[in-house]
Image (cartoon, rainbow, N blue to C red):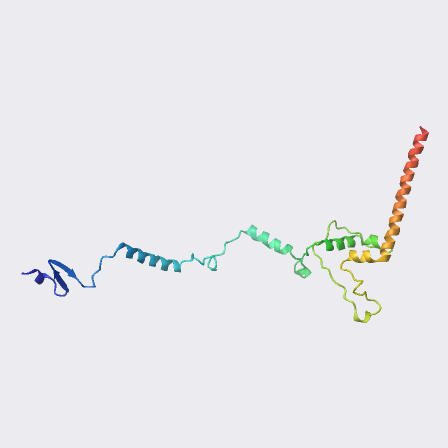
Amino acid sequence: MTLSSRIDPGLRVKELGGLYISFDGSKSKPVSSSLKKLKEKKIQDEVMKKSVIGPDFEKKDSVPPYSESKHALKLKRRAEREKSTGDGWFNMKAPEITQELKGDLQVLKMRGSLDPKRFYKKNDRDGFPKYFQVGTVVDNAADFYHSRIPKKERKRTMVEELLADAEFRQKNKKRYQHIMAEKAAQEAGKRNKKKKKFHKK
């Protein structure tokens, strides 16, 4: 019995000098290490595509939100509340106090000394108010000719208006002169008292 008769007739086999090579593709062939690595890399790439972390990880909204503590949430809500007065006062926001606003607020605080004929209630507040709004008085169209300030005479702030008012400056000048005269009289009285003391001794 020859070698060729022992081989399964279902397989296509070629005899090459005592070496039998099978050309059947159904059986697994030996795979090289480079092919294995390529397959593993392909599998890894497919898995990474499905995972959350990737090159566009920061752009995605797939990151679960971190949970804040109750204390941190309470502080955040308090900070939000302090930005405005709330619903009771129509959510009035706290304005940024500039140098011009500061000057106007100081004038309002000292309004009692501006006009001696008018009486104003004493201001109990030490500093400036936190929440306030500044409005502009709109002239009536009917008063265009007789009780309207022309645009050239209008000023940006109350301080500028007071400085531009000639009557106010005149009153202040008189008041300043009166105060200086009183001070001079007091100093003269003190000098006379000292002289009398020295004469007695």
Instruction: Look at the image and tell me in which quarter the N terminus lies.
Output: bottom left
Q: Residue at x 59, y 51 (%)?
A: 75
Could you say which quadrant of the image residue 162 lies in? bottom right
Residue sitting farthest toward the front: 17
Is residue 13 something that shows in the picture?
yes
- Quick check: 5 above or below 111? below
Instruction: Look at the image and tell me in which quarter the C terminus lies.
Output: top right
Residue sitting farthest toward the left: 1
- Residue 22, given in percent of the width and then of the height, sits at 16, 61
Judging depth in this view, the residue of 14 and 145 nearest the camera is 14
- Quick check: 194 above or below 57? above
Q: Does residue 82 appear to the left or right of 173 in the view shown?
A: left
Judging depth in this view, the residue of 115 and 49 nearest the camera is 49
Q: Residue at x 90, y 41 (%)?
A: 186
Q: Does residue 165 appear to the left or right of 43 in the view shown?
A: right
Residue sitting farthest toward the bottom: 142
- Residue 63, given in percent of the width and then of the height, sits at 47, 57
Q: Does residue 47 appear to the left or right of 122 in the view shown?
A: left
Could you say which quadrant of the image residue 136 lies in? bottom right
Q: Does residue 188 appear to the left or right of 137 in the view shown?
A: right
Could you say which quadrant of the image residue 5 lies in? bottom left
- Residue 171, given in percent of the width and then of the height, sits at 87, 54
Q: Residue at x 85, y 54 (%)?
A: 169
- Residue 160, given in percent of the width and then of the height, sits at 79, 57
Is residue 116 something that shows in the picture?
no
Q: Residue at x 86, y 49 (%)?
A: 176
